[in-house]
Amino acid sequence: MADSRTNPSSEMSDAQLIQQLALLGWLKTDSVECKNFLTTVTGMQVAREILHRLSGQDKVDAYRKECIERVADFVRRNPRASQRELNAEVEKNVLLFASKVQALDSAPLL
């Protein structure tokens, strides 16, 4: 179950809202169908979280953002940098990004 929003505020994500609706339905009716739906929704959320953690996607995204920010910072600090200097800075940061991503392969899974 893909979560279409990532909201840092106290607002529930779509997946959390669906899970809460399933829980509410089960609590109100105590029906087998609602319990099965709650079990399915919860199972999907757990599976999604495990996949997300195993893939290391959060870290890859953070490393990508860091790489872009470092290059942008270099450009801001060096507005008259030559194309060669810009290329060297981009290459340096891309290699750093790649080495960090590659290190994820040897990191513990959880």
Image: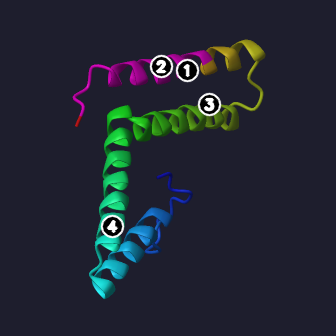
Which span of residues is magenta-colored?
A: 91-109
| Sequence-wise first label, 1 or 3 | 3
Q: Does the magenta-highlighted stretch encompass residue 108?
A: yes
Point out which mark residue 71 bears: 3
Q: Name the magenta segment's main secondary structure.
A: helix
Q: Where does label 2 land, which residue?
A: 98
The quadrant where residue 81 appears: top right
| Sequence-wise first label, 1 or 4 | 4
> How far is the residue under mark 2 from the one under mark 1?
6 Å
> How far is the residue under mark 2 from the one under mark 4?
40 Å
Q: What SS does tag 1 mark?
A: helix
Q: What SS does tag 2 mark?
A: helix
The three-letter code of the residue at mark 4 reads: Leu
> How far is the residue under mark 1 from the one under mark 3?
9 Å
Q: Height in image: 77 above or below 4?
A: above
Q: Check contact, mark 2 vs mark 1: CB within 8 A.
A: yes
> How far is the residue under mark 4 from the one under mark 3?
46 Å
Q: Where does label 4 land, which residue?
A: 38
Q: Nearer the viewer, residue 109 or 40?
A: 40
The residue lying furthest to the bottom in this view is: 28
Q: Where does label 1 land, which residue?
A: 94
Question: Residue at position x 24%, y 31% from top?
Answer: 109
| Sequence-wise first label, 3 or 2 | 3
Q: What SS does tag 4 mark?
A: helix
> How far is the residue under mark 1 from the one under mark 4?
44 Å
